[in-house]
Amino acid sequence: MSLESRLRGILDDAKKKYFTEDHQDKASYEETLGLLVSKFCEWDGSKIFKVSTEAFEDSNFHSFNEKFNDLWDTEERNNDERLKIIKS
């Protein structure tokens, strides 16, 4: 069995476990994978961002990835500034 087939099985299992019965058939594999990535990364935005950028890079979205990295860097700087204000 290929890794992709095994992943589809895991995603099908995750749909049953994490979505309400009325949403299980509506939930896409992408939605379910996103949920699992969030859980696997323990809702840590930096880790989720890393997974996303690796996926875009692997898919040859290099120009987009540069902009995405710039946006993330800006967000991180803004978060750092907000934390400084909160701590002072």
Image (cartoon, rainbow, N blue to C red):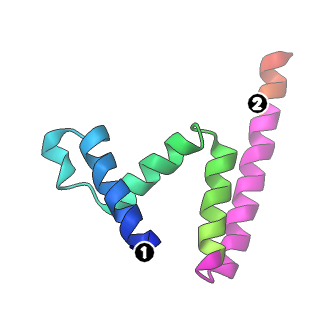
Q: Secondary structure at mark 2?
A: helix
Residue 58 image offset from top left, x and y in percent: 63, 77
Residue ID at (28%, 55%): 12
Q: Hey, which residue is sitting farthest front in the picture?
A: 1
Q: Name above or below for residue 58 compared with residue 52.
A: below
Residue 31 image offset from top left, x and y in percent: 37, 55
Q: Name above or below for residue 7 compared with residue 47.
A: below
Instruction: Report which residue position mark 2 lands on.
Output: 82
Q: Secondary structure at mark 1?
A: loop
Residue ID at (63%, 39%): 44
Q: Amino acid at mark 2?
A: Arg
Residue ID at (13%, 44%): 22
**Tag in front: 1 or 2:** 1
Q: Amino acid at mark 1?
A: Ser
Which is more toward the observer, 10 or 57?
10
Is 40 part of what is drawn in magenta?
no
Q: 67 left or right of 56?
A: right
Q: Which mark is residue 27?
A: none
Quadrant into which the C terminus falls: top right
Instruction: Report which residue position mark 1 lands on.
Output: 2
Would you identify the image quadrant in which residue 78 lies? top right
Which is more toward the observer, 86 or 53?
53
Q: Hey, which residue is sitting farthest bottom in the picture?
A: 60
Mark 1 / mark 2, whichever is N-terminal: 1
Tell me where the magenta segment starts and ends, as one range.
Answer: 58-81
Instruction: Using the numbered discs, state the Cα–Cα distance from disc 1 to disc 2 in whole angstroms.
Output: 46 Å
Residue 72 image offset from top left, x and y in percent: 71, 55
Other-residue count near label 2 (Cα within 10 Å), few / some / many at <14 / 14–19 / ≥20: few
Would you identify the image quadrant in which residue 42 lies? top right
